[in-house]
Amino acid sequence: MGYHHKIVSINLRKGLRFEDQARAYLLRFGLTLLQCNFRCRFGEIDLVMRDGDTVCFIEVKFRKSLAYGGAAASIPISKQRKIVKTALFYLSSQRQYAHHALRFDVLLIQHQPDHSNHFNWIKNAFYGE
């Protein structure tokens, strides 16, 4: 395995670990998991969950420090558009959710100086166009 593949593998494992933490955090608030890491030609959505009758498309972001704006600054409008397109594609293949409300959330995980993680769940972080 080359150096680049090792780095990708390490980053993928780390990303999956934080997505597991995010899923567990959201399950404690009563959300129901529909799918993890939904991928299609338009992009990827980390978590698809239900909050009552609302289908939530959740982007998980982890940052070790607040440099460069921390986790919140890492979701530009171009990424938001990709998430919306991906969500619409998901809904086209999951007709049972066609009449549910939609919500685009972000769960920010920020590493703290005491080595704990702070979770900041932003509901309706952005809107589909």
Image (cartoon, rainbow, N blue to C red):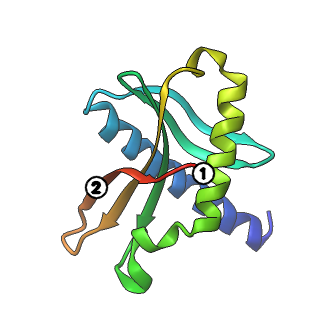
* In this picture, residue 23 sits left or right of residue 1: left
**What's the amino acid at mark 2?**
Phe
Residue 18, image x, y percentages: 44, 52
Q: Residue furthest left?
A: 114
* In this picture, residue 106 sits left or right of residue 11: left
Residue 75, image x, y percentages: 52, 66
Quadrant of res 117: bottom left
- Please state which of the two labelled residues, at mark 2 or mark 1, is closer to the viewer: 1
Query: Closest to the observer: 54 or 5?
Result: 54
Per the model, the C-alpha gap separating discs 2 and 1 is 27 Å
Residue 26, image x, y percentages: 33, 37
Q: Is residue 94 above or below residue 82?
A: above
| Residue at horizontal 60 percent and vertical 51 percent from the top | 129
Residue identifier under label 1: 129
Quadrant of res 51: top left
* In this picture, residue 24 sits left or right of residue 3: left
Query: Closest to the observer: 34 or 57?
Result: 57
Q: Please tell me how crowded label 1 is: few (under 14), some (14-19), or many (20+) other residues with Cα within 10 Å.
A: few
| Residue at horizontal 64 percent and vertical 57 percent from the top | 81
Residue identifier under label 2: 119
N-term-proximal mark, 2 vs 1:
2
Query: Closest to the observer: 114 or 26?
Result: 26
| Residue at horizontal 35 percent and vertical 29 percent from the top | 31
Q: Please tell me how crowded label 2 is: few (under 14), some (14-19), or many (20+) other residues with Cα within 10 Å.
A: some
The quarter of the picture where the N terminus appears is bottom right
**What's the amino acid at mark 1?**
Glu
Query: Is mark 2 in CB contact (under 8 Å) with mark 1?
Result: no
Residue 45, image x, y percentages: 60, 45
Q: Secondary structure at mark 1?
A: loop
